Amino acid sequence: MVGTVHSIIMGGGRGSRLYPLTKSRCKPAVPLAGKYRLVDIPISNCLNSGLNRIFLLTQFKTASLHRHVQEAYQFDRFGGGFVEILAAEQTAEKEDEEKWYQGTADAVRQNLEFGHFDANDDDLFVILSGDQLYSMDFRKMLQQHRKLGSEVTVAAKAIMTSEAKGLGLLRTKENLSIAEFVEKPTDPEVIQQLVFKDSNATAKEGENRCLASMGIYVFNVGTLRAALQTDHKDFGKEVIPGLLGKAAMHAYVFDGYWLDIGTIEAFFNANLALADSRDAFDFHDASNPVYTHPRNLPISRVDAASMDRVVITNGCLVGSSRLKRCVVGLRSVVGSDVELENVVLMGADYFEDQRMLAANRKDGRPAVGIGDGSIIRNAIIDKNARIGQNARLSPEGLPEGSVGEGLHVSDGILVVEKNAVVMNDFSL
């Protein structure tokens, strides 16, 4: 008998590497590619794989995530599917002591203890990250898991050793069983010990490759319960290394597009890669659609603008401007004589009507969007930002960190925070 598959998406971290995009929202709720949210990627992969029992574990700033999930993922009552958000609960192990999720493994442990998953002994758990961009058929990994009699399967991808920073690395035997696992090694000698020869590699001759954990796991429920009887708090750092030699653990080698977008730099590059149309994630794959909130938005209108490698979504108004390598998000308003280069513009949550625009003029406040004559380069502009006329924004020569109210430089990229106001003629 084949048990039920429970999909668990980890979204409970503070998302500090994506700050300030996570200043007012949790990581899975961060907008992506103009019209999606990060959480849409793992949920879509689950649904495209026929997995519709999906739990989303969160604990920080979940309001916008709740709204998005409730509006985007509504299942009919006959299919039995759902996306359920399990936010961290305050508990009292000792009097007046509050306990929140202490890590990915601890989050699963707490919900297992509370019986939230309603799991039987022959069930499987698929553990997923909430900040990755990829398209993967989990059925193939589940098939291998059952065929090899695995207790744990770790999804892995071959990468260059130069890309190994910040990733868990593993070494396998010929039967794909995991012989060694090192979480985020920094010592070059340790990394070299995990290098393997890939006959199908497309890398330059002599360039070393290793297998990186994708942070995607399949667990037998019994093995998961036993592993979580310890005080281990994190899967990658503690649970997986702790199971080496104790459980039948194999790697599932994935050869498709995959990118960890947990940092501002990775997020910025992943978005702009969509405009480059080279080596980018394919949002146009009809066999693996990415689902999101269906919005009844009007068409976009573009005046006599110059556009070079631009992704533009619904409900946008673009004046006679110049856009080069940009992502233009929902309801974006771009004035005339604007220059945007290497810009991720997230757009807005609403359209401003005439009454709102009149109130802006009275208060001396710019409208939502980008005013006439502004020049912006190498920036992420978060939702509902107001940038006035003739503003000049670029991170060039600026230090990391806050560079003004609502303005932040991270990884050499300027981030205009959500709801920020940049007045006319401001220069940075």
Image (cartoon, helix red, strand yellow):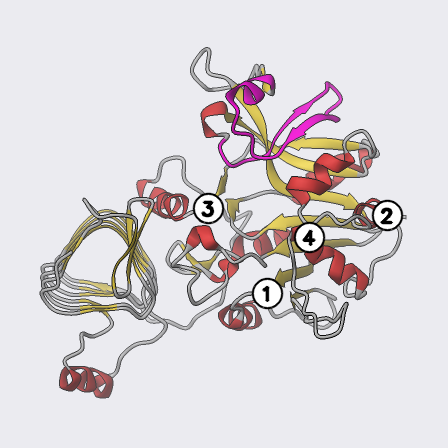
The residue carrying pointer 3 sits among few (fewer than 14), some (14 to 19) or many (20 or more) residues within 10 Å by Cα, namely many
Instruction: Name the one closer to the observer, 270 or 397.
Output: 397
Residue at (31% x, 40% y) in the render: 276
Q: Are marks 4 and 1 in contact (CB under 8 Å)?
A: no
Residue at (45% x, 59% y) in the render: 30
**What residue did someone put label 2 on?**
222
Residue at (36% x, 36% y) in the render: 278
**What residue did someone put label 4 on?**
50
Q: In this picture, which residue range is highlighted in magenta?
A: 165-193
Q: Is residue 49 visible?
A: no
Residue 178 inside the magenta-drawn segment? yes
Decide which of tag 4 and tag 1 comes sooner along the chain.
4
Answer with left or right where residue 204 lies relative to residue 389. right
Q: Position of residue 100 (x, y in %)?
A: 65, 64
**What residue did someone put label 1 on?**
59
Residue at (53% x, 24% y) in the render: 187
Snapshot quadrant of residue 117: bottom right
Q: Tag 3, which secondary structure?
A: loop
The residue carrying pointer 2 sits among few (fewer than 14), some (14 to 19) or many (20 or more) residues within 10 Å by Cα, namely some
Instruction: Name the one closer to the observer, 374 or 294.
Output: 374
Decide which of tag 3 and tag 2 comes sooner along the chain.
2
Cα distance between the residues tagged 4 and 1: 27 Å
**What residue did someone put label 3 on?**
261
Q: Are marks 2 and 1 in contact (CB under 8 Å)?
A: no
Instruction: Give the residue type that dot 3 points to.
Output: Ile
For discs 3 and 4, the disc positioned in front in the rendered view: 3
Cα distance between the residues tagged 3 and 2: 32 Å
